[in-house]
Amino acid sequence: MPPKPSMPPKQPMPLMPLMPASARAAVVCAAALLLAAAAPAHADGGGSPAWSVAPSTGSGTRPAQDGRPAFYAEGAPGTVLQDTVAVTNPGPKPRTVSLRGADAGADAGADNGKDTGAWIRFAQRQVKVPPRTRAEVPFTVAVPEDAVPGDHPGVIVASGGGRTVGVRLHLRVGGPTLPALTVERVRIDQGAGRITYDLVNRGNTVLKPKLAVHADGVFGTLLDRPARPLPVELLPGRRVSLSEPWPDIPALDAADVRLTATATVPGGTRTRARDTATASARFVPWGAVVGGAAALLAVAGGALHLVRGRGRDARVPEPESGAERERGQGPDTARELAAAGTGEEL
């Protein structure tokens, strides 16, 4: 057998010089600061993970936020709907959380509201959640007898420990669906280079609108933008002010702008809402017009001044005196005067 190759002798590892005690202390402090900066922040300021609120997923230990993203309910006027909200406290200290209902789009600090927020009732308005525990709080939504059919979005609002959290409640009251959308107050802002307008949901369903923009000028099409989704969710009865950029707006032209808004009712239906509004504008570069007018006035003023100066230079001859007339008489004139009164024939 061939001899095994000899292994090179192991080299001793170089010894690292010992750091002074002061330097070692500085390194330890720096590492501690880095670890503290890498630690996650706590939203409730209590030194523990923040509590959360979400639709309940039923029994078990799975966090509620892993289930439904929002509450969904549907019923006819006069019915009472039931559901459960879960408040999870993962921290080591107990947490007290207050619950209330609110209308969608309302201020988080406002009252319950006049619509869905006023229809929500909790089994407990205030719940104390032990450490590392999830509390289940039942609630009901009492739909009034005279409730208007359609969508009535609301919010379950939870407050505690300096935090306020909301979960959407999508409520649909049974009855005919009436989508209606209008485009209003169309304005063309030449200085800002944009088209401003309002969208109004005049129906009873939540709408996600699309907008198409078209503009014609004297010499042809200026804008032609196909329908595109807008980043808004228009609740029933709500108005929103939006704008369309027009960076290359003409400086000299006459334009007719047409906005067409469409929306399909969520839920897979083919029911659509549609409306069109127009506006006209005349684009005139007033700076150039004013400057040109000033130049014309200056030229006209100079010409008038020149004409008046020439008029003053043209002198009118004065009438001659008697002596000048006599000096200016010729021989024929003298002979005529001598013969005058002699009876001679001239």
Image (cartoon, helix red, strand yellow):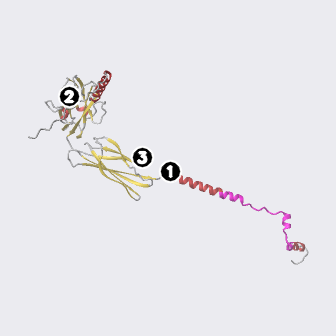
Q: Give the magenta-colored segment's residue range.
A: 306-333
Q: In x, y percent, where is residue 264?
A: 25, 47
- Which mark is on residue 287? 1
Q: In x, y percent, where is residue 329?
A: 85, 69
Q: Could you tell me how far apart the alpha carbons at marks 3 and 2 are, in whole angstroms?
A: 49 Å
Looking at the rendered structure, the kind of residue marked 1 is Gly
Image height of 138 relative to 289, above or below: above
Q: In x, y percent, where is residue 25?
A: 30, 22
- Residue at the farthest top position: 21
Residue closest to the eye, 128 or 328: 128
- Residue at the farthest left position: 1
* Residue 326 position by quadrant: bottom right
- Name the residue carrying label 3: 192
Which circle's residue, 3 or 2, is located before the other in the chain?
Answer: 2
Name the residue rendered at 16%, 31% in the picture. 62
- State the quadrant of the C terminus: bottom right
Looking at the rendered structure, the kind of residue marked 2 is Thr
Element at label 3: loop
Residue closest to the eye, 140 or 345: 140
Name the residue rendered at 58%, 54% in the picture. 297
Q: Nearer the viewer, mark 1 or mark 2?
A: 2
Looking at the rendered structure, the kind of residue marked 3 is Ala
Q: In x, y percent, where is residue 96?
A: 24, 24
- Name the residue carrying label 2: 88
Residue closest to the eye, 90 or 254: 90
